Amino acid sequence: MPTRTARTAWNGTLEQGSGQVEMTSSKVGTYEVSFPKRAADEAGGTTSPEELIAAAHSACYAMQLSALIGQEGATPEALDVKADVSLGPDQGGGFRITGIALTVRGEVPGMDAAAFERAAQAAKEGCPVSKALTGTTITLDAALD
């Protein structure tokens, strides 16, 4: 399996500095980061490690759930997955990811709500990004549309 790479160039202090995150492997773009905007309610056009984790988790989870639904003999017409990643203070000092809330809504002909919930829970446990984030509370809200 391939290794994917991202790169960050940073200048200045934590509070006054800024950086650029480059999606090196895919070459899809370079995005601004700064700590003040990371810790603010409004991102102001910059991304953050938490948003990048949310993107990775939602994509990974959608793929895993799609695979599990397929193993049950169904095909999802649509999966809408959202990941909310929260940053907060760490009791030991500094900050930590305090939780991740996954929300999925699916359109899956031929699959009932109970089977969808089972697949959704299994995807939460089996997604490689979920596995990488053990130690962080991950909640799931799953339903068929």
Image: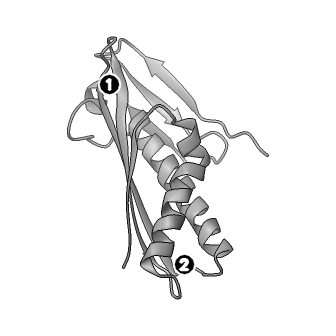
Element carrying mark 1? helix
Quick check: 49 above or below 67? above
- The residue positioned 53% from the left and 46% from the top of the image is 29
Callout 1: few (<14), some (14-19), or many (20+) C-alpha neighbours within 10 Å?
some
Amino acid type for the residue under numbered disc 2 = Pro
Q: What is the secondary structure assignment of the residue under circle 2?
A: loop
Q: Nearer the viewer, residue 58 or 40?
A: 58
Q: Relative to residue 15, is residue 104 depicted above or below? A: below
Residue beneath label 1, please?
Answer: 35
Vertical arrangement, residue 94 with respect to residue 58, above or below: above
Name the residue type under label 1: Phe
x and y percent of residue 48 in the render?
A: 39, 35
Residue projecting furthest to the left: 41
**Mark pair 2, 1: CA separation:** 39 Å
The disc at residue 125 is none
Which is nearer the eye, 109 or 122? Answer: 122
Quarter in which the C terminus is drawn? bottom left
Residue on which the image places disc 2: 76
Q: Is 84 above or below relative to 75?
A: above
